Amino acid sequence: MTQAELRLCSLLLQEHFGEIVEKVGNSLLRTGPRPLRLLVGDTGLLPDQVKKALCVLIQHGLARYEAQPRGPVEYEARRRRVLRLLRYPRYIYTAKALYGDPGELLVEELLLHGQLPMSSAVARVADRLTETMEDGKSMDYAEVSNTFVRLADTHFIQRCPTAPEAPRNAEAPALIAAQEPYAVPRVCLGGKGKRRHSCDEEEEGEHKAKRQKQEGGSSEAPPDDGIYWQVNLERFHQHFRDQALVSAVASRMDQTSSEVVRTMLRMSEVTTASGASHTQPLSSNEIFRSLPAGYNIGKQVLDQYLALLADDPLEFVGKSGDSGGGTYTVNLHKALVSLATATLESIVEERFGSRCARIFRLLLRKKHLEQKQVEDFAMIPAKEAKDMLYRMLSENLVTLQEIPKTPDHAPSRTFYLYTVNMMAAARMLLHRCYKSVANLMERRQHEMRENKRLLEKSQRVEAILASMQATGAEAAQLHEVEEMITGPERQQLENLKRNVNKIDASENQVDETIFVLEAFIESTTKRP
């Protein structure tokens, strides 16, 4: 694990869960699997604090545990899963785009709590949606429940692996995978969302719950008790990959071609494994029947589009047979290679200029070239070409391969060939992306620290205004409270908001690059 990854993981854990969880997580990330005793010694925290931090990490899937045949239970951090904390806003936004407000809040609640039963998630979301509605209106549980079922049917959420009853001598139960990870239990969730009560009513409710607990009485367990659900991040990644592929086809060809590819991906999204290099073969007739209603293109026109996509040099779509009017697949691996290549070319062009990008593309196409060949093919003067090649070589974007004619490796009798190692370049840029995101997060924290006092004052004024509006205060009184924040302070707050928004947007843009590079590296390493 690189220092850049470790730094980013620490910042993410601290931002989402606080300092104690960050200390425990950081210790696990640095040292690998460890028992509780060593964790307590390494972090300098109390055993109870370490146990609670481990509970939080396990609840959110950021750590796992394993019982050793001889010795104590060992805990291990899941590095890749910790890095996914960066992508939480994107998961929530995607759920909103696909399934509206109920979908957005369901995914948000599951990410916020790590795992929840269906009944609990539906009730929480219905209550939150009711809060935003006009007085007298409320959100029906059935509507939220239907969205939950749709999310499960499209595999965006899944059941958590269940832990069986452990024998007394076992220190930790072995996790077993649920046989039906997307099967929604038949639960009749009737009712409507509730609004929050006043403070007095809340306190009274808490006292009542405590009295029930002390008297030994317990409320009836929900019908889906013990069945917990979590967000299926791999399915969201599959959706992001499909969206990137469709956008690439649209920019290269036209909107209709991209819609054909979108239809093919939608037909095979549930049947294709997340790490597969191809989608399932689909016949031309099946694709024609599945096209959206708004696209009034004939079967003959569709066949022409499919033939055009199959003949394209990028080979996003390949023809796998002639049955059913011709069967076609989407070549996911080649699509990811093309996306990663385009990302690398764009970065080279931004950092070194269009002439360097020309040399880089030339090396990608020709594979191996001597310096003289680069000068001739790229039509760039010798001095400039040499300077550009050495600059890219120093940044590890291109590599130099020596091929000696004689065993003594004499420079005069050796070929020096420039080439691009895509995997090495992608890994190097991925490392830089991690550093960039960590820098952005630290910059945001610095901005918030510098303006901490002003932010607290702004929050106090907003709270006073909200309470006065609730009691029906006059406009003059409200204006007087607003004047507590002076003009320069208001300007400073606007500047802070603008800077933080820029940092957030930059984080999202870097994360898109991280996603493309990670998907390319994973797809390439999985290939035989």
Image: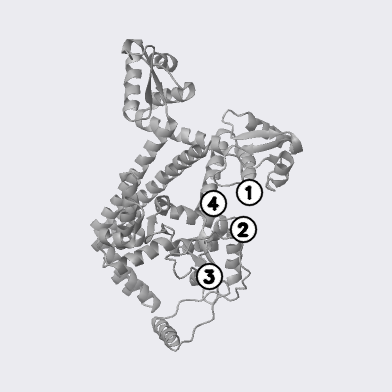
Along the line of sight, the residue nearer the viewer: 335 or 309: 335
What kind of residue is marked 3? Gly
Asked if disc 2 and disc 1 are in contact, CB closer than 8 Å, the reply is no
Among all residues in the image, which is located at the extreme top?
412
CA gap, disc 2 and disc 4: 12 Å
- N-terminal of the two: label 2 or label 4? 2
Q: Which residue is mark 1?
A: 271
**Lower position in the chain sequence, tag 4 or tag 3:** 3
What residue sits right under mark 3 in the picture?
226
The residue type indicated by label 2 comes to Asp
For the residues labelled 1 and 4, the Cα–Cα distance comes to 12 Å
Side of 330 where 212 appears, left or right: left
Q: Secondary structure at mark 3?
A: loop
- Return the residue at label 4: 235
Q: Residue 65's spot in the image, x, y percent?
A: 41, 59
**With 303 as the anchor, is 411 left or right in this view?**
left
> Which numbered disc, 3 or 1, marks the residue that appears first in the sequence?
3
State the scheme by which the image is colored: one colour
Q: Position of residue 141 (x, y in %)?
A: 58, 71
Location of mark 2 (residue): 153
Residue found 35% across the figure and 22% down from its top: 389
Task: Please name which of the two marks, 3 or 1, marks the residue nearer to the observer.
Answer: 3
Residue at 36% from the left image edge and 52% from the top image edge = 501
Using the image as rendered, state which of residue 73 and residue 281 is in the foreground: 73
Q: How many marks?
A: 4
| Residue 435, image x, y percentages | 33, 44
Q: In the figure, 132 relative to 500: above or below?
A: below
Q: Is residue 216 left or right of residue 329?
A: left
